[in-house]
């Protein structure tokens, strides 16, 4: 037990003093914070929206003329065009105004427009990006006029449906605002965040174990401490560091999303549910212990980091499969498949948090998922302890994934 | 009471029998050599002594009983494959290894500067191991093995890859530790170093003990009646009582006939009026004994 604490202290402080760790801990939240700060400053000074900044600074502020030979456009409402599209009586006059720098260019709606949709855009030079924005504006103007210049009808045309949903089984009701795209971004972001952080933090364990072999300190350590103490000391140290890192990053993300609402309108409807934040602690701990132990076992069997890394793909397959199934998990949160992935210990550390960011999860699933996860953690740690024997740690033999899996699953006599 | 008693230990890895029925004892305050060719089972025996490997059968008694955590802290070990954490400053690395050997932070703060000064590493204490020369790293490893003032020091291949200066440093250190009453086990196949340092030895090959005893006793056991002379005059082709005359670089090796002693050979040489610069009874080198014993052992295995 004393040796576990000594190993824990050394590993914890060694990583904590590493410049790369400190930088990643600070820079990951700092860079988006700085970006948001800059955006805030711009907003405070200019009181301009993104689109306004873009149009004012990038696009030519001159209006575009419309020569309506098809007699399609009856009205140019200001609430729609904001003066960016102006009627012109003839192509000749529009050409002169463009040459004189009074117009950015002009559209000519051909007489047979209603039959063919033909239209020309006459302009002095190419400007691809602003052109796309202006074409959208012209399309909106034509649609408005084709709908009889009725603002209400036009608005309905632009946003034709507002669904409400009723579910026969209230427990599996999807309470999400399905008209809001942000509803889907949060589960995507949560899934990717926890996928990445479990992958990165468990990879640290592989590195920590192979490092002792590559530095040739392992035999000195084994002459002082029991292999299991080394393993437990390391996993506790890296687990604490990774949990700290995860909480700092997650906390920063929540804070940034809150602060950023003033600068980025699309963030206004987005937030990470509190139950995701609460559940992230036990599920991350479980996920780290599970994958971190497996990676440590891999490090014990592999002669070096390179060979260990080559074999981690097999162990990470459940996590990779989770990311590959992300659409199905988010679209059908109550399906049998998603429920299975929520309960399966090798996918639950990520999928449960995805589920919680989609909506409520039945309590029994939370309880069973946690029980299965930590039950599996105990089994895997006991299996990996078999690999933390001197025979494997001091062996220079090539990596054998078969030996690894057999020893973890079935066990092996200690050296 | 012996400091270490190895009693009929056996250890196998899969189908490979690394050591079999190996027994020897190490006495307090001596330098004991564990000899054998590469792959003979020396390192496995050391690892069994250190409780890194559990023997399949047999037992090891250390300081009067089985290995315990406390006893492990009374052993300083330098393995053949040795290193330091490359990305960690030397003083922090040594502090960690010393804490694992049971030293408190206070004890380390007191002892480490003394050891760093003794090994001329004070100015390099804050450097990472990868910034140190190989010699400096080896000195660091010696500190790690000695800082907790162990009763027993076990060194596997103490002189491998050492330059002459560091070889002398290690030799002086081993003698110093023996004089301080420490028990030292060194595992090597460098016979010249063994001859200079060791009190007793055991020779292992194919995982089995081929020979053991005190250094002088082993030499006596392999001693012949041969003599080596440095003569001012050329020797005649035949001498009474001599079965074979072998010309060496600047001397002769004479093999007496059965029943003839070295004394009789000297009398014969003087009687012949041969002027001698030196006359000595040929003592086999440990190298010669090693090769002879290992060859005989191989013959038995074949």
Image (cartoon, coloured by chain):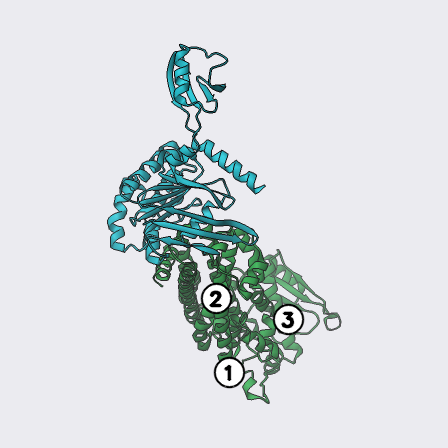
Chain colours: A green, B cyan
Circles 1 and 3 in contact, beta carbons < 8 Å: no
Please report whichever mark, 1 or 3, sits nearer to the chain's N-terminal start: 3
Q: Is residue B48 left or right of residue A326?
A: left
Return the residue nearer the eye: A239 or B84: B84
* Pointer 1 chain: A
Secondary element type, mark 2? helix
Please report whichever mark, 2 or 3, sits nearer to the chain's N-terminal start: 3
Q: CA distance from mark 2 to mark 3?
A: 63 Å
Circles 2 and 3 in contact, beta carbons < 8 Å: no
Q: Position of residue B284 (x, y in %)?
A: 43, 29
Viewer-side label of 1, 3: 1
Residue found at the very far front of the displayed protein: B259
Question: Is disc 1 surrounded by few (<14), some (14 to 19) or many (20+) residues within 10 Å?
Answer: few
Return the residue nearer the eye: A250 or B139: B139
* Pointer 3 chain: A
In the rendering, which numbered label is found on residue A236? none
* Pointer 2 chain: A
Q: Is residue B284 left or right of residue B142?
A: right
Please report whichever mark, 2 or 1, sits nearer to the chain's N-terminal start: 1
Q: CA distance from mark 1 to mark 3?
A: 52 Å
In the rendering, which numbered label is found on residue A381? 2
Circles 2 and 1 in contact, beta carbons < 8 Å: no
Instruction: Give the image quarter of residue A256.
Output: bottom left
* Residue identifier under label 1: A364
Q: Position of residue B20 (x, y in %)?
A: 50, 50
Viewer-side label of 2, 3: 2
Q: CA distance from mark 2 to mark 1?
A: 26 Å
In the displayed structure, would residue A335 be above or below residue A252? below
* Residue identifier under label 3: A139
């Amino acid at each position: 037990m004393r040796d576990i604490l000594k190993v824990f202290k050394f590993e914890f402080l060694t990583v904590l003093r590493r410049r790369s760790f400190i930088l990643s801990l600070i820079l990951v939240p700092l860079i988006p914070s700085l970006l948001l700060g800059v955006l805030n400053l711009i907003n405070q000074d200019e009181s301009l929206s993104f689109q306004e900044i873009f149009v004012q600074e990038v696009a030519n502020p001159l209006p575009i003329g419309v020569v309506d030979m098809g007699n399609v456009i009856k009205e140019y409402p200001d609430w729609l065009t904001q003066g960016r599209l102006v009627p012109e009586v003839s192509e000749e006059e529009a050409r002169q105004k463009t040459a004189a720098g009074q117009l950015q260019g002009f559209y000519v709606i051909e007489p047979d427009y209603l039959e063919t949709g033909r239209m020309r855009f006459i302009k002095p030079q190419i400007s691809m990006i602003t052109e796309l924005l202006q074409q959208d504006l012209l399309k909106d103007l034509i649609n408005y006029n084709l709908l009889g210049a009725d603002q209400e009808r036009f608005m309905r045309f632009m946003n034709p449906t507002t669904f409400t949903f009723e579910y026969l089984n209230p427990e599996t009701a999807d309470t999400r605002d399905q008209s809001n795209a942000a509803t889907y971004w949060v589960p995507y972001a949560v899934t990717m965040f926890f996928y990445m952080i479990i992958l990165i933090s468990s990879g640290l364990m592989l590195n920590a174990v192979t490092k002792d072999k590559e530095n040739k300190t392992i035999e000195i350590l084994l002459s002082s401490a029991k292999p299991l103490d080394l393993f437990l000391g390391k996993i506790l140290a890296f687990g604490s560091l990774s949990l700290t890192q995860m909480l700092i990053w997650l906390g920063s993300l929540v804070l940034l999303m809150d602060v950023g609402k003033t600068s980025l309108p699309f963030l206004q409807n987005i937030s990470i549910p509190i139950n995701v934040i609460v559940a992230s602690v036990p599920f991350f701990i479980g996920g780290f212990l599970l994958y971190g132990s497996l990676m440590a076992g891999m490090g014990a069997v592999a002669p070096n980091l390179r060979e260990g890394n080559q074999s981690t793909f097999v162990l990470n397959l459940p996590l990779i499969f989770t990311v590959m199934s992300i659409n199905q998990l988010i679209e059908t949160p109550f399906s049998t498949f998603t429920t299975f992935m929520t309960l399966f210990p090798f996918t639950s550390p990520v999928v449960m948090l995805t589920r919680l960011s989609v909506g409520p999860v039945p309590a029994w699933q939370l309880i069973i998922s946690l029980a299965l996860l930590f039950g599996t953690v105990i089994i895997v740690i006991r299996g990996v302890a078999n690999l933390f024997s001197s025979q494997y740690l001091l062996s220079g033999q090539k990596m054998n994934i078969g030996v690894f899996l057999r020893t973890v699953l079935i066990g092996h006599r200690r050296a | 009471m012996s400091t270490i008693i190895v009693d009929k230990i056996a250890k196998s890895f899969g189908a490979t029998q690394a050591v079999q029925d190996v027994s020897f004892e190490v006495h307090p305050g001596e330098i004991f050599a564990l000899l054998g060719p590469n792959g003979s089972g020396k390192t496995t025996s050391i690892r069994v002594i250190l409780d890194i490997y559990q023997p399949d059968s047999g037992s090891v008694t250390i300081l009067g009983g089985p290995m315990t955590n406390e006893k492990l802290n009374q052993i300083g070990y330098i393995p053949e494959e040795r290193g330091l954490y490359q990305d960690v400053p030397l003083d922090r690395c040594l502090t960690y290894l010393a804490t694992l050997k049971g030293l408190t932070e206070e004890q380390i703060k007191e002892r480490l500067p003394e050891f760093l000064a003794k090994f001329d590493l004070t100015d390099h204490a804050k450097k990472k191991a990868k910034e140190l020369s190989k010699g400096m790293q080896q000195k660091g490893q010696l500190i790690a093995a000695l800082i907790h003032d162990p009763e027993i020091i076990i060194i596997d291949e103490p002189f491998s890859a050492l330059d002459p200066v560091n070889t002398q440093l290690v030799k002086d250190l081993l003698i110093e530790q023996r004089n301080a009453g420490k028990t030292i086990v060194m595992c090597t196949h460098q016979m010249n170093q063994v001859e200079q340092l060791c009190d007793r030895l055991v020779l292992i090959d194919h995982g089995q003990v081929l020979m053991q005893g005190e250094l002088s006793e082993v030499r006596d056991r392999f001693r012949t009646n041969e003599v080596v002379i440095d003569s001012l005059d050329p020797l005649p082709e035949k001498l009474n009582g001599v079965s074979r005359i072998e010309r060496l670089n600047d001397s002769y090796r004479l093999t007496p006939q059965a029943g003839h002693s070295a004394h009789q050979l000297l009398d014969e040489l003087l009687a012949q009026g041969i002027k001698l610069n030196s006359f000595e009874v040929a003592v086999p080198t440990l190298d010669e004994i090693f090769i002879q014993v290992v060859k005989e052992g191989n013959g038995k295995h074949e």
